[in-house]
Amino acid sequence: MALVVFAVAAIVAVVQATGSEAVPGPAPEEQIVAVAQQRQPSEPAGHSAASENEVTTEAEVADEPEPTIESETAEVDELAESQAQQGEVQDEQQPPAQPATETDEADNPLRGFIVPIQGACVTEFPGHLPEASRAYRNDGVHEGLDFYQWASCTTISFSTEILAAKAGVVVRADVDYVDITPADWERFQAANWEGDEILDELRGRQVWIDHGRGIVTRYAHLSAIADGIVKGAEVQQGQVIGYPGESGQREVYANPGTDIHLHFEIRVGNGWLGQGKTPREARDLYLQAFGRAD
């Protein structure tokens, strides 16, 4: 009986082996692909992982609130206030301001100036800045910058060269100026130094340069005016136009040589740069004009 069972089993094994050769099954790799296709849904044409990321990004952007008119207006007002009347706003990430280009100057005539004394810094002494109080003028104010040796980072004497802060045309040059006298000073005191004529006399010997578009620079208290600087003359930026002094001041006759300085103004229409600001704000506007703003 055992022999019969063994024989039957052998015959069955032979038949199965013969049948498997006739119908080969898929290779292992093909089986893996087939299973993967059954488990994953089909994707529409052109769809990819990258396109999914794009859709997600667009959805995120769509969920972000759009800026309102009120918020945009507030931002503009804040920028305008921080820059006063100076036009372009610099980003906080930008490096320190450089001298303005011709394009900048065309857009804003209060750019592109140089300091009128080589090597001088812009004083930080409040009394030398625009809008500093001048109580003796019936609560008047200073209308420009003063450059004194002790506050301007360089030597300032009768021989120091004063430079044209920008190219332009001379519209005033007091080549025939006569110094004030003690009688003139008494007259100023009697009038409490008020009135445009007296204020003009107090500025002493002057040169004015018109730079166009309502911008004029004034150079006051000069001890002398350079050769060739006359009304109508064209000057280039950096050209020597005169020398510091104390003309228009009491010291010119009472204590000569003790009040040597340059009074410099950038006039804007009928007013002056920094008008209505604090002295510190006015200084910042001059720094911007000189390309020295932080």
Image (tube, rainbow, N blue to C red):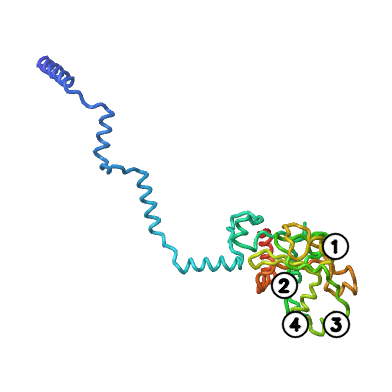
Q: Which is more toward the observer, 13 or 230?
A: 230
Q: Which residue is mark 4?
A: 138
Distance between mark 1 and mark 4 Cα atoms: 31 Å
Going from N to C along the chain, the mark reached first, 2 or 4, is: 4
Quadrant assignment, res 244:
bottom right
Q: Which mark is residue 157?
A: 1
Q: Which residue is mark 3?
A: 186
Q: Please name which of the two marks, 2 or 3, marks the residue nearer to the observer.
A: 3
Q: Which mark is residue 143?
A: 2
Q: Please name which of the two marks, 3 or 4, marks the residue nearer to the observer.
A: 3
Going from N to C along the chain, the mark reached first, 3 or 4, is: 4
Q: Where's residue 86, x and y in %?
A: 61, 65
Q: Which is more toward the observer, 38 or 232?
A: 232
Going from N to C along the chain, the mark reached first, 1 or 4, is: 4
Q: Residues within 10 Å of mark 2 (few under 14, many from 20)?
A: many
Question: Please, is residue 280 above or below residue 139 in the view?
Answer: above
Q: Amino acid at mark 4?
A: Asn
Distance between mark 1 and mark 2 Cα atoms: 22 Å
Distance between mark 3 and mark 1 Cα atoms: 28 Å
